[in-house]
Image (spheres, rainbow, N blue to C red):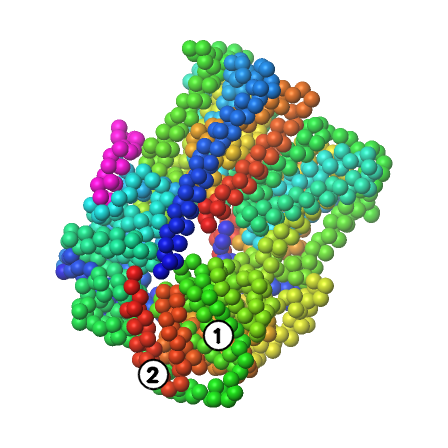
Amino acid sequence: MSEQMAEAAPAAPGSPQAQVTDGTWIRSSSVYIAFAALVLFDFIVTPGFRNPAVIRSLLFDSAPVILIALGQSLAIGTRGIDLSVGSVMALSSSVIGITLGMGQGGSMVLGIGAGLVCGVFNGLLIAVLRIDPLISSLSLLVAARGLAQALLGGARMDLPFDGPIPWLGAATVSVIPVTALIALGVAMLFAFLVKRTTPGHYAIYAGASRTAAFLAGQPVRATLAFVYGLSGLLAGVAGLFATARLGAADPNYIGVQFELDAIAAAVIGGTPLSGGRISVVGTIFGVLLLEVLDASFIMNDISATYAQILKAAFIVGALYLQRAGG
Amino acid sequence: MSAVGDLAGAKRAAVNRARIVGLIQARGAILVLLLAALAAGLVFPDFLHAANLEDIITAASFLGLVAVGQTFVIILGGFDLSVGSMVGLGTVLAAYALPFGWVAALLLPILVGTLVGLIDGLLIARTRMAPFIVTLAALLALKGAAIALAGESMVIAAPGFFGAIANGHWLGVSNLIIILLAAYALGALALNRTPFGAAVFAIGGNEEAARMLGIRVERVKVQTYCLSGGLAGLSGALLAARLSSGLSSAGNGYELQSIAAAVIGGVLLTGGVGTMFGALAGVLLLGLINNVINQIGSLSAAYQGLASGAFLLLAVMIQAGLSRSRRS
Amino acid sequence: MLLETRALSKSFGVVAALRDVSFSLRAGEVHGLMGENGAGKSTLIKLLTGFHQPSSGEILLDGTDVSFDSPRAAQAAGVAAVYQEINLIPERSVAANIFLAREPRQLGVLTDTAKMVADSAAILGRYGLAIDPRRPLSTLGLGLQQMVSIARVVSLGARVVIMDEPTSALAGAEVDILYGVVEQLRREGRGIIYVSHRLSECYRLCDRLTVLRDGRMVESAATGDLPRSRLVAAMLGRENAAGSAAAPHRAATATAAAPAETAMLVTGLSWRTRVRDVALSVRRGEILGLVGLLGAGRTETFKAIYGAETPDRGQVEVAGRRLAHARPASSIRRGLAFLSEDRRSEGIFPKLSVRANLTAAVLPRISRFGIVSRRRQTELVTRYIRELAIKTTGPEALISELSGGNQQKVLIGRALCTEPRVVMLDDPTRGIDVGAKAEVHRTIRTLAQQGLGVVVASSEVEEVLELSDRLIVLNEGAVAGELETAGREPEDVLALLAAAAEAHTQ
């Protein structure tokens, strides 16, 4: 995972991000082109696609994925990866479920907090014990899912019908869900973080050359802990959104294989696995592309498993293109 | 030059430390398994009865077969996330092939598994794509294939001899246990006593050096993934025989569990180090934990995931700690 | 003649790594190959072992023209190399390593472990190595691991054995064992090319010595006919005659004035065996030069001072204040800056812009509440692009588009952003063309004129002599001598180096 690659799209002046060379414009914009093409196709061909209910549903599903994909793009930007996000979503969900007695407001905070704790733990394993991010997040994937299941006894726990959590699961502003708006807001904050703040810059430096960053006196270990802590926090919020939408805390169902979507969205959207560059807009469109893909399959009556296969093919293809261009 | 004397002493201390670390890594899991079994036997009166022990081992045998292949792959320096779905597909293929005889029911899943391993291995070795991505894609593809072929499940009407393979006994010992032990014995032999095994260790230990020393790295990689796929297929066939049905969701989670078992058994995820019987100890330890959790009526089955996850995390942290002390 | 090269040359693009080298090796001969970094030794080895193919010239084995299209072909012909980095598998046993990829078989499929162990013991025994073949390789010291490498190569039938820095990681008794192995190889009629920077060893072991510099063979003679001083002069001799003639020798002007305060004081610094009880001091406005042969410990000394490696012992004071923690971040805070010799992997951030690279060490200073001030960043970048005359299309240009010299200027700019009191530069003109070198020299002198303490290391004696006010000679990790550069000639420094090399005995 260490290819040198000509990067895409000019980054804002001031951010350390890698710059564009003309030849890769098409490859980097491919996510936007693909998205536009797919939406066009669906508008014309797919029955029922133009129904606003469909768009609303799509956006509800996208909100949590956008959050974890953002966290993932940051981790990938440091040349790492976070495989635990799906399981952390489930853990957040379970924590919400068992703490309902403390009031929904409290549950939400605790659920998100659980995500943060997992993320920081992961970050410490990586920064202090020097465990490879792939290995530590893989272990956390198993452990967090297990804990999530154990907390609820492997069963699903339905949420009450009113309160802030169910509200989150259904509230919209015209056709756009509140959770999607929050996700968008978080994305803008995230973009600001990466482009303008020191922790964001440190992450990019660490991804470009960890040794040079260390010799330049940058706090590399703290940066890694921060990156994975943030990823966990976002996964916690994503778990809350998914739980609200589902109307239940379900540790067997929430977040399953979501890490795949997050990685796919980040990679397809132009955040290379070799680090040094993070594309927020690309990541969002990557998420939307994958969600529309899922919807296209369902609405054209093709089994969801083929969508999964195609998704996997997309990632493999995007990665292959990255390597070929390097 | 007193520095030289200090250096020699420091080196000796480091060598001894490395020796102890190596011992813990190789044999630690077996010790933990024995202690755990002893503890369980003390707490639960029925635990150490032959019937219960047989239950534990036969239940673990399907994961155990998969773990043999996974151990090879991890020592090589990769991992195979497709084995879980391959088991599921294997059960379905066995159910399909049974009308053509029990031999076909055994062979078809093995052949398909080997073929999948071949494709995985070629992609990984030739295009240098991360094993994680390639085998993950295979996981999804195989799951889709299994569901497409059999829906949720496919009942085997007349298992006959095929069923007896998995459910029968030979000389008083369950067939599955014999198969499991045979697999591990052969696996250990292949790993430790054949040029193939030596090559696997070499590539995992230092791939570039292995290449320079004349090992055909790409070929060995492909062979290893074929082995992993084939064993997963075999496990699926035996599972179908046991359950008398093809179940597309069978083996779900085996990929992570086999990795966990190997890691707990002292196989380093960074590659180049590991023992077959360590992995077996890891598999049996996981099986023991599941059994114990079942015995404790008040804890639900959901705790099994947590327990194996916690063990895995602990093992990873210990491995990292041990590697650090070895490095310094 | 066992092995011979005739007018062997190799170029990588426009860079000529090896030029017109005619080298010869007899059976039963130990031939020393010497030269500094970049002299062409590794290129020659790679050509002989089949890693690269020559651009021109011939290689002859037993008088016959040969060409090796791969390392395996060279090995099959009997030419093999043993490197500093042990290219074996540490977790496997000694016997397994010796026979890897060609294990003796039993029943066709299994490895005949007993035979493997017995054969390994036999080979090791032949060279006086009492090593249990069943031990994991990693339990042996690096020196013995290297012997195992040699044993493997010999068991593969090597007639030409190339040893690259074989004793660099050895200590004491291990070195004697290596000498014994070399003797045995010689008795067996093999030819040995012994690459080393340790003069005492080469003089003891080798029958003939060849020196490479700038890709050419500058000396080749029987050991007895080559005095040390001539050898050292050949290795570090004048490279750029025009350059050194044109540049006026630095007169001791600044030091004639009142002695400036001490900018940095290092005492009792030790790190493993590579830095041994080093003490040095730099005054404000002074340029201190660090000179030594390859392996003398220049880089390790810098890193130990800077905190990139944690020293075992010792103390560093900058502007009178002691550095409490050995960490780059602390050093920068206290005004100590360091430029690594490995620009590519330790200096620049490859995919990022000039702006990002220049300001990498001072983000906290140009940000408020964690937000980086674009304005202040631009100020810094434009200032240093101007002051250091960095040739670039602009702050947003990718650092990889800049030439080596300009990249180095960016790195110097990065150090200057931190407003240091002391700057340490490790081989700053490595891989930079002549014109840019002069510019970097100018920049370094300006730093001193502005009142900074500067420490510069280099393997080019003229360069260091020109630049510095004072010079420290390092040998095997320890300070071996010191002199004021005013009025000195390179020969004086070379003499000091040669004497230090001779005085050092294992």
Quadrant location of the C terminus of chain C in the rendered image:
bottom left
Q: Is residue C108 magenta?
A: yes
Crowd class of label 1 (few under 14; some 14 to 19; many from 20; radius 10 Å):
some
Q: Return the x and y of residue C232 as percentages of the image width and height.
A: 28, 73
Residue at 34% across / 58% down in the picture?
C168
Q: Which residue is mark 1?
A: C281
Is the same chain shared between marks 1 and 2? yes
Name which quarter of the figure residue C201 lies in.
bottom left
Which amino acid does the dot numbered 2 rest on? Glu
Mark 2 or mark 1, which is nearer the start of the sequence? Answer: 1
Q: Above or below — where is B77 with respect to C40?
A: above
Q: Does residue C232 appear anywhere in the picture?
A: yes
Q: Within the magenta stretch, is there residue C267?
A: no
Secondary element at image label 2: loop
Taking the spot 30% from the left edge, 72% from the top edge, the residue there is C498
Q: Which residue is mark 2?
A: C489
**What secondary structure is found at the residue carrying circle 1?**
strand
Residue C437 location (% of width, % of height): 43, 77
Nearer to me, B114 or A275: A275
Q: Amino acid at mark 1?
A: Ser
Q: Nearer the viewer, residue C303 or C473?
A: C473
Subunit ID for the residue under disc 1 = C
| Quarter of the image where one finds residue A48 | top right
In this rendering, would A186 be left or right of A122? right
Q: Residue furthest right?
A: A162
Residue C297 x, y percent position in the rendering: 40, 65
Residue occupying image coordinates x 73% and y 49%: A183
Residue C21, placed above or below residue B152 = below
The stretch in magenta equals C105-125
